[in-house]
Image: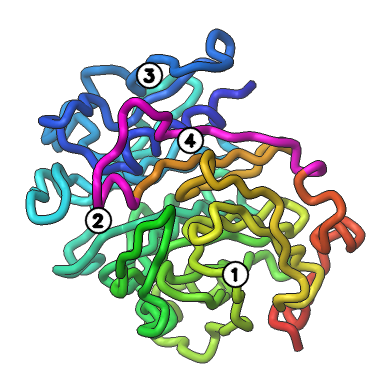
Amino acid sequence: MDRDIWLYLLCALTSCGIRDVLRGIPATLNYISLDTNRGGSPKLTPYPNWAQNVAGDCDNGLTTAYRIHADECDRLWVLDTGTIGIGNTTVQACPYTLNIFDLKTDKVLRKYRLRPDDINQNTFIANIAVDLGKGGCDDAFAYMSDELGYGLIIYSWENNTSWRATHSYFMPDPLKGDYTIDGLNFQWGEEGIFGMSLSPLMADGYRTLFFHPLSSEREFAVSTRILRDPVLALDSYHEFQALPERFMGHSTSEVMDENGLQLFNLVDQNAVGCWNSLLPYSPANHALIARHDEAMIFPADVKIRRGMVWIISDKMPQFLITSLNYTEVNFRILTMPLADAIAGTVCDNAPWKFVDNNALWWGR
């Protein structure tokens, strides 16, 4: 098993990036070696080491690694929110920082602090997607979703700079802020843009970024041609597209593979759904591929890698609203072959070739 898989999954084992050293989370980014651990509750190993997991060491360490992504160039992109604590105890110990590691050497390739103009007083960056273009490893952009500040932050690897895009599609739906998960009813009415996934490269050399607010049942889309251009990203309202409603509940993360198959976590259903982007985006073309009312309470993240689906669940509502029962298993990594997951569903009904046809995506 290649290491970029298990590095990615272990980020969320620290309660999805919420870190408070007083509560016993000494390292924010960890990994498990699958060569020696195939079950049970294995010990976590700090990545890249203990010294670089010192909270508040803004120049050299990671404070709170909220989301990470391993790309095809053996780079690990780590979004560090710089915060310690939760709720009213939160302290912004360090600036928001994007750290890029070389997975071959475990050395830091770049440490980029977001500009003051990239964020606002409400900023909480919830997710990261990495876009590799036709130009190879240097033609890389990171898209970071500002869940509570309602923006999208774009970072260019080649130019080592960033900019911010805003749009009303990044905001939550005021009618979709009520949640009931594992018997807990609560309201997250402010949760905006959260999950993101990137289509395969299209004929014009760009991808489509699909995204959705957490408190919403809609998916939206925009070409990376718009996002990659700092001028277009500021003023291209009509280039963003609204897709039909999903009608399957709230979704956290999503991912799309090289064939255009999208998977998305459904937190209300303790499940993962799918959509084959060769088909119109409509309820008739959505399906469940996995559901479990114990093991998948709050599926926080999902990835597809080499024909395998990887899901992580973490009981986030219990952690935030009541308390975790530490005599139970609270954090799980689940995996299954992708072909088995979609077998017999509408997601497996179309031939596996990618069609450059945006009309299919938007159900026209």
Residue at the spot of label 4 = 8
Query: Could you tell me which residue is drawn at 58 percent across and 73 percent down?
Result: 223
User: Between residues 66 and 298, which one lies in front from this camera angle?
Assistant: 298
Label 1, label 2: how far apart the Cα atoms are = 35 Å
Which residue does the image show at 76% across and 45% down from the upper left?
341
Q: Please rate how many residues cluster around mark 2, counting C-alpha atoms within 10 Å: few if below 14, some from 14 to 19, many from 20.
A: some
Q: Which mark is residue 44?
A: 3
Judged from the image, the secondary structure of the residue bearing numbered disc 4 is: helix
Q: CA distance from mark 2 to mark 4?
A: 22 Å
On the image, numbered disc 2 is attached to which residue? 114
Left or right: 210 in relation to 44: right
Q: State which mark lies toward you, 2 or 3.
A: 3
Residue 145 position (above or below residue 231): above
Q: Quadrant of residue 151?
A: bottom left
Q: Is residue 291 magenta?
A: no
Q: CA distance from mark 3 to mark 1?
A: 34 Å
Which amino acid type corresponds to the residue marked 3 in the rendered image? Leu
Q: Kindly indicate the quadrant of the structure image that contains residue 54.
A: top left
- Nearer the camera: disc 3 or disc 1: 1
Q: Is residue 287 visible?
A: yes
Question: Decide: marks 3, 1 in contact (CB < 8 A)?
Answer: no
| Span shown in magenta | 317-340
Give the residue pinned by disc 1.
248
